[in-house]
Amino acid sequence: MTFYSISLAIVGVYAGLNILINLFVAYRVSANRVRTNVMTGTGDDEKLYNASRAHITNVEYTPIGLIGLVVLHMLSASIIVLHVVGLALTIGRVLHAIGVSRTGASTPPRLIGTLLTWVGQLVAGVACLFYALV
């Protein structure tokens, strides 16, 4: 396997994991909709609201991180950089979903998940600029 194909495989692993995470949080919204019979919005149900927020924020942040990974692959970025971005994004999204799903209040998993997601995006953005310009 060449560096380029290993790099693409790494992107594929993180894309696959994050797609599955998104499917899981989407399923939680649907399951709560069936439970509450609320098909639009969240009504007054806290569990449905929290599940919905976990899904919404996942959909807001994940695509940007994955785009960063794809661009880094295309720029032949270091495998270490790909793993840093991929791990920070993936672990961050899991922790955030756990934290938001439990309560609307601030929790350690939610905070750490948010910070890891931002770190992943920060590293992706800076690395994209570095590999594109240097």
Image: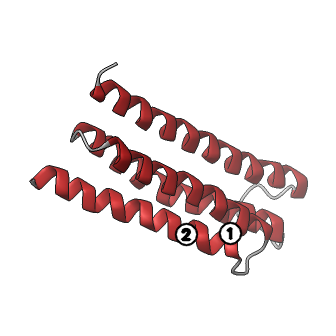
Label 2 with label 1: CB-CB less than 8 Å: no
Q: Residue furthest left?
A: 134
In the picture, measured across the screen, residue 43 lies left or right of residue 4, that is right
In the picture, measured across the screen, residue 120 lies left or right of residue 99, that is left
Tag 1 or tag 2, which sits nearer the N-term? 1
In the picture, measured across the screen, residue 112 lies left or right of residue 42, that is left
Q: Position of residue 119 (x, y in %)?
A: 43, 66
- Name the residue tied to disc 1: 109
Task: Give the vertical position of 45 relative to 128 (above or below).
Answer: below
Q: Residue furthest top?
A: 1
Look at the numbered disc 2 and give the secondary structure of its residue.
helix
Q: Position of residue 69 (x, y in %)?
A: 36, 46
For label 2, count other residues whose C-alpha is less than 10 Å away and answer few (under 14), some (14-19) or many (20+). Answer: many
x 43%, y 35%: residue: 10
x 33%, y 56%: residue: 124
Between marks 2 and 1, how big is the CA–CA gap?
Answer: 8 Å
Q: Residue furthest right?
A: 35
| Residue type, numbered disc 2 | Thr
For label 1, count other residues whose C-alpha is less than 10 Å away and answer few (under 14), some (14-19) or many (20+). Answer: some
x 68%, y 69%: residue: 109
| Residue type, numbered disc 1 | Pro
Task: Give the vertical position of 8 relative to 73 (above or below).
Answer: above
Which quadrant of the structure image shows residue 1? top left
Instruction: Report the number of discs.
Output: 2
Look at the numbered disc 1 and give the secondary structure of its residue.
helix
Q: Residue 133 versus residue 47: which sits nearer the camera? A: 133
In the picture, measured across the screen, residue 97 lies left or right of residue 88, that is right
- Name the residue tied to disc 2: 114
x 59%, y 66%: residue: 113
